[in-house]
Amino acid sequence: MGIKDVAARAGVSVATVSRVLNAHTSVSPAARERVLAAVEALGYRPNALARSLRTDQTRTLGLIISDVLNPYFTALARSVEEEARALGYSIVFGNADERPELQDHHIRTLLDRRIDGLLVSPADGGSPLVLDAARAGTPMVFVDRWIPGADVPVVRSDGRAAVRDLVAHLHGLGHRRLAIIAGPAATTTGSERVAAFREALAAYGIALPDAYIGQGDFQAASGRRATERFLALPEPPEVVFAADNLMALGALDAIRARGLRVPHDIALAAFDDIPWFVHTDPPLTAIAQPTEELGRAAVRALTDLIEGRTPESVTLPARLVVRNSCGERTTTAATRATLATRRSDA
Amino acid sequence: MGIKDVAARAGVSVATVSRVLNAHTSVSPAARERVLAAVEALGYRPNALARSLRTDQTRTLGLIISDVLNPYFTALARSVEEEARALGYSIVFGNADERPELQDHHIRTLLDRRIDGLLVSPADGGSPLVLDAARAGTPMVFVDRWIPGADVPVVRSDGRAAVRDLVAHLHGLGHRRLAIIAGPAATTTGSERVAAFREALAAYGIALPDAYIGQGDFQAASGRRATERFLALPEPPEVVFAADNLMALGALDAIRARGLRVPHDIALAAFDDIPWFVHTDPPLTAIAQPTEELGRAAVRALTDLIEGRTPESVTLPARLVVRNSCGERTTTAATRATLATRRSDA
DNA sequence: CTGAAAGCGCTTACAG
DNA sequence: CTGAAAGCGCTTACAG
């Protein structure tokens, strides 16, 4: 059942059917009406494959999501899909699961399907595939993570100020031995968050020894392993800062398995804020990204690129959200509500 | 750059190129080698659109996900994608966001793109679009939620036994006023979970009054509203059972906003278990579904359908995971670890 | 083993 | 305003 059937039933040529379906003006009202009636009667829907093959555009954007199990990325995906839909595009997702080969697999199939543009948050420092695609002219924008040197707009948030605020908060609480669970050094967010943390510590004359840098991969299991290693140290850190929410989950697992309590025995903070952090035991201090805005900005940049406008890179600040996972604080109006739930003992 | 360029460079016809690319046997080793070399040199990738148009198959499955922000569904999506990839298919997701119109929007665009089959967890009781598509022969299987009466295989879990276990647990703890936050009555999981709860209560001679049935939509905000209403009752329930994890999150928000504590002031349990439940305050008692197996089984059923085999509906049991959100229990080896974190007071 | 040709379902100059 | 025809990039009988 195709355009031919519609044409036959409406008594016109396929060209005319195509014209009314694509809102070309030059169609007589009578013909238009007959076509529309035939479309309705037949329940006709144009074959998007054929249309795309002909027009060389799919009105589809690819989004390589680093990890579907990561609430930060699903929030991002939701925002991306929403903005794209508003602009008349649909989104095809690929879950990289933080694995570069899987990321490349998905990019390849998206490219094969001739998506109009690609939103990627690289799982590695620069897969040749991504670089080649960008060079070959595939409209592309990086979200959250990016690859330096590629001529690709970047939409991300800058967490440096928030990390400084976090370190000030931790220092004010009396903590001096601070550790971080990093993401893969090959990713920008993996290395930048460590750099920001190190810089912020330096301002207080505190060093970040290698033993206090846990190597994670942004997934929960790696947070668990890194935390176990910290806890086994002769001089364990007083604070663990997880570079994303999933590694914080892993850290909680490890801390609990040891029978320790947050923040009494060890403080914990995380990059990325998620709804569950309000209800964890204790509520977790976190750095929140303007996730929805990032998603929207990324789609706008990509559609600008696709439609011949000049895309804008955008960097939005992240901000510190203090809760109770790093230690005692004076009770203020802002913290009273959460404090009520925090005091506890085994 | 297309198959013609490869053919030209290899000095063969496009037919031959196509043959080597599709692993047809009848190609001379010499020709094969030249074609492969040309493909390599040119970095040629077949246009999937053209191929699909011709072969009438896309090797793509659509998955309508009820809500990307729901960890249960993202876990399902991940499992689905994994199994599909193993079977040589890729997945295109559509996020229905629990909205029937949005669900239909995505189904329409997936159908337009000629996906080979559709996995759906209906957001409503039976969109005409879904029913028509099934009737028209679109290979389809329902996952988690389903539409009675449609001739479509169903892959889901049966929570009745687990709900009975939950009610026994609650009753044993002395609770008699039990409430539920339901999902939309039009969805199977929305109505079934209430029915199972009501039945289980009946076994103890306990009724489920209307005032103790909160009407939710499986999203957090509705859980919050329903819980607020429960708490405002002259005789509030002693237990709230949220029919999914997101409504449990909303319930926690409402309980905390009132300055109440779980389980001291009110007990809470949830359908669907997620990793965060181990670390909430207190750890949440939940009913766990075999999510990964459901995803795999759903994909297998769908590919069976597509490839002409006989698909199997499958129903897997859910199971109760007792933690500490419903009240005191005797300390057993199993609960000791979590108990250590539970005792608390404001 | 190989090529010329038809055709998948559309869109779009071109001509009228 | 409208239709005949070409063509998007593939695959696949058909013939040799």
Image (spheres, coloured by chain):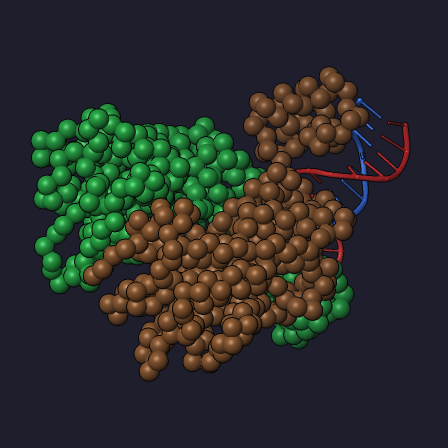
Chain colours: A green, B brown, C blue, D red
- How many discs mark residues in the rendered view? 0
Is A317 displayed left or right of B299 in the figure?
Answer: left
Question: Which quadrant holds residue A261?
Answer: top left
Along the viewing direction, whichever of B88 and A106 lies nearer the viewer: B88
Q: Is residue B173 above or below residue B279?
A: below
State left or right for residue A166 relative to residue B179: left
Can the viewer see residue A324? yes
The answer to which of B291 and B299 lies nearer the viewer is B291
Residue situated furthest top in the rendering: B30
Which quadrant of the figure has residue B171?
Answer: bottom left
Residue at 35%, 46% (x, y): give it.
B337
Residue at the image point whose x is 59% and y is 51% from the top: B294
Q: Is residue B3 left or right of residue B250?
A: right
- The residue positioned 44% from the left and 55% from the top of the image is B322
Report the quarter where the C terminus of chain B lies: bottom left
Up/down of B301 relative to A183, above or below: below
Q: Position of residue A246 (x, y in %)?
A: 36, 43
**Residue at image x 37%, y 71%?**
B238
Q: Is there any visible trace of residue B268 in the rendered image?
A: no
Q: Position of residue C3 (x, y in %)?
A: 78, 28
The relative height of residue A35 versus residue B139 in the rendered view (above or below) is below
Work out which quarter of the rendered image holds the N terminus of chain B and state it: top right
- Counting from the top left corner in percent of width and height, residue B77 is at 52, 49
Front-most of residues A2 and B66:
B66
The spot of residue A225 in percent (x, y) is 35, 33
Extreme residue toward the bottom, this view: B234
